[in-house]
Amino acid sequence: MSLHVDGLTVYYQSLRGDVKAVDGATFEIADGEIMGLAGESGCGKSTLGKSLIRLDPRMRYLGGHATLDGTELPIWNDRAMNPFRFEHVSIVPQYALSALNPTRHIGKMATELLASRGFDPSSHEKELRRRLELVGLPRDVLHRYPIELSGGMKQRVVLVLSSLLNPSLLIADEITSALDVSTQRAVGELLVEFRDREFVKSMIVITHDLSVLYQVADTILVMYAGRLAEKGPAEDVVHRPRHPYTRLLLSSLPEVGVRYEHKRLRGIPGRPPSLLDPPSGCRFRTRCPLATERCKECPLFAEVEPARSVACWKAAA
Amino acid sequence: MMAAGAVEAIAPAKPRPAPRSEFLYFALRNWKFVLGSSVVLAMLLLAVFGPLLTPHKPLSFSGPTQQPPSSDYWFGTTSFGQDVYAQFVYGLRSAFLVGALGGGIAFLVGAAVGFTAGYRGGWTDDLLNMLTNVVLVIPTLAILIIVAAYMNVHSYTTEAVLIGLTSWPWAARAVRAQTFSLKTRDFVDIARLSGRNTRQIVTTEIAPNMSSYLFMMFILLFGGAILIGASLDFLGLGPSTSVSLGLMMNSAFLSSALLLGIWWWFLPPGLGIVAIVGGLYVMNVGLDEIFNPKLREL
Amino acid sequence: MTRYLVRKLFIYLLTFYVAVTIDWAIPRFMPGDPVQQLLSRMHAQPQGQEALTGYYSKSFGFDVPIWKQYLNFWAALFHGDLGRSILYFPTPVWELIRGALPYTLALLVPAIVLSFWAGNKVGALAARRKSLDNTVLPVSYVLTATPQMWLGIVLAWVFASSLAIFPVTGAYDMSIQPAWSLEFAGSFLYHWILPFSALFLVSFGGWAIGMRNMIIYELESDYSNYLGSLGAPNKLVRKYAYRNALLPQITGLALALGAVVAGAIVVEIVFSYPGLGSLTLTAIQNRDYFLIQGIFLFLIIGVLIANFIIDIVYVFIDPRTRIGMQGGA
């Protein structure tokens, strides 16, 4: 499978104008690739992920294309997207802990969901049980109500359910954000396992936590203020970042085993710009230590090496 | 030095309206709020100034009986020769009195009980909960019937007090639920650590954060009190020496106004109540939208 | 769960106890002497006054010490003895209530059930369709702000007095005797429609508004979003939303019972419908204290039982409460 995204632009409508959440995103994901999508809060990564499967009522699609396995995804049309959902594109949402109907047995809900989509629940039942066991959930979880499960258990149920029909693309939206570190690791390993067993062909793992991505993702795509900053193999991006933002982001991470007695932890001065009225040209230039006059012109997200793209005049030079 | 080179200042974000005028900004644009409050305001003005516009007294048998509306008697006369318009506007006064006082008392008692139960928790909560449940389940009108039957209610103030003392449980429950969710917040912890007592914490930390909710609750209680008062008066249990909208309907009914077709006698009082209470409800919906940004229509 | 039910039962028993005590206490602690009030209304002859005073004092139980009065009251209650009516002497209060009850129930039960069902359905529909919402919502607000007796008067005036489609008073044609016959049923329905409508319409408004708001809330919830993201058809999402929105409405039903009963009382009066409402008015007008007290007790017990039933039913239909009590994860 492969996913091609070209110039995707999605804004939010608000009383004070349009929030330019995703502006001209272009990237590719290959078959079997786990791509991490990283960035600060409010940079648009969740919006990008969500727009590939279902637009929020507040979101406005402005342009761009997304092609999955050669077929264009009609993301601007809610109804036309329906046949793709669950089967070809699926999502493990940010709110997985409250994603299950509180007044329904989990098994019953799964059955009704499958039936309503035209699938035969009984033919999927065996696989469902197998996968639940695989992720370490007890056999009777299908007979329980969501309130009876812990947060981690619910997370795993949602992961299994969302990937039940072996979608080509799974979007995992901040699924580790609410978990403690050891559970994060377990969930991260599950993601990789699901890909390895081909339950899911490719994934987009959205998170603000670069360290998780380093463990889980094959490639990392960094976003800043609604625009793509950098993309490349995980190893490469983490050890040899080329975009100034990525560099600063990585240097803000405390390292295990390093004591910060003699130097302070460096962050990035300033705050992310408001997406209502972002700076013209490169959106990072107001905080970038390398900014020049040229940066008032928006840099292209250009491929500087094979499989390595950066949106920065300095990096492309 | 981190930032080097020519860095242009970021264009300032569009100015946000200041908090107080932000309310007005949204309020005046919300047609439900505007419509509801206009109607209520109109009725209030009528209640205050209406009686000044007519020479007739509500209970005096001044005119010819059973007259349809005319230039002399704008709403016509009753079968006893009383001016319906005068009765109506004086009745509006009683309605507002009962609403404000009855609703106000219910509000104060309900809020006090709700805050205490919600904030204190433990067995205070259990006790107050029990009290609330007991008063809640007993039908308000039944209690009022029995009290009023024996008590000979003399004034609308008394009636309002009775209504207030029996309709607070619903408010208590609502306030308690909200307090529960607020009391786990950090600013409450800080206040408690700095040594404030319960009363102070409730009045300075918790209540202001629920102010919009409390205000809306008061409006509902206001409307509810008017409706209950009207029923009481209609049953003949209200004060008989002054005028109220419910009493108008009572006398109209007892004088067979229905069968005689004296519509100008029994229509206005009900319409008045529908206007005030309906206006309050609609205003409330508007307020909900104004206070809750998620509900605002773009 | 048993603990929860036992606790609920305890609260209801406590409420019952408080209600009965209030019922007993009020005549005795109100200013004024009820016996004297009764006598002054009866314009009894001076000679008879003393005998009557003695009689009524005994009926109220004023001749024995207070604590004994209280116990006697309870004893009588458990015998089903609510005293004898003053106005309809010597008919026992209980008999009068029993005669009027079927008519009140005939109004109340259909009004509650149908308004709940119809109001919820329409409210749910309005939540989905903006065009429907724009008509249903304002109408519902007006309806729920309408005093029931006034609506009854208006309906009676329009449909009965002026247009003479429906009758204005009574539960059935005076010429027919109550019986299990088609003729009686027809006449009964004919007389029933207007008072029923008055009750139905006002309650309907309330339920429609409530359900509409609840459905909107449920449709915006996380589980609805998730189902939508997985491509579930609107029908399934709506089905879940409806069932979940119904739960708080049922709680609201318990709370609204008192108000509906109050509405029934006043509407009956408007239509001279021979139920508890008219009985209450007559009792009030004639200061028939025993009758008032009896009706009061009866109403309260009825509402208490209904509330209790609703509480129990609710526990069974909402898994969150059920499991919360068993100490879920």
Image: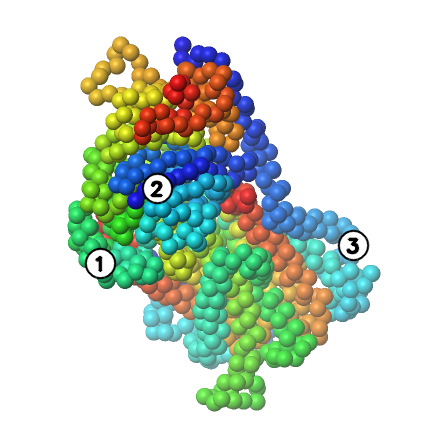
Q: Position of residue C192 (x, y in %)?
A: 54, 77
Front residue of A238 and A114? A238
Figure label count: 3
Which class describes the residues within 10 Å of circle 3: few (<14), some (14-19), or many (20+)? Answer: some
Chain letter belonging to callout 1: A
**Alpha-carbon distance for marks 1 and 3?**
80 Å
Q: Residue at x 22, y 58 (%)?
A: A125
Q: Quadrant of residue C38?
A: bottom right
2 vs 1, front mark: 2
* Numbered mark located on residue C40 in the image: none
Q: Residue at x 43, y 30 (%)?
A: A227
Q: Quadrant of residue B256?
A: bottom right
The relative height of residue A241 versus residue A143 in the rendered view (above or below) is above
Amino acid type of the residue tagged 3 in the rendering: Thr
Left or right of B264 on screen, residue A111? left
3 vs 2, front mark: 2
Instruction: Kindly state the secondary structure of the residue where label 3 is placed.
Output: loop
Amino acid type of the residue tagged 2 in the rendering: Leu
1 vs 3, front mark: 1
Q: Residue at x 68, y 76 (%)?
A: C162
* Numbered mark located on residue A3 in the image: 2
Can residue B234 be seen in the rendering of this structure? yes
Which class describes the residues within 10 Å of circle 1: few (<14), some (14-19), or many (20+)? Answer: some
Q: Residue at x 17, y 50 (%)?
A: A133
Instruction: Kindly state the secondary structure of the residue where label 1 is placed.
Output: helix
Q: Which residue corresponds to mark 1?
A: A125
Q: Which residue corresponds to mark 3?
A: B54
Left or right of B10 on screen, residue B191? left
**Alpha-carbon distance for marks 3 and 2?**
80 Å
Chain letter belonging to callout 3: B
Chain letter belonging to callout 2: A
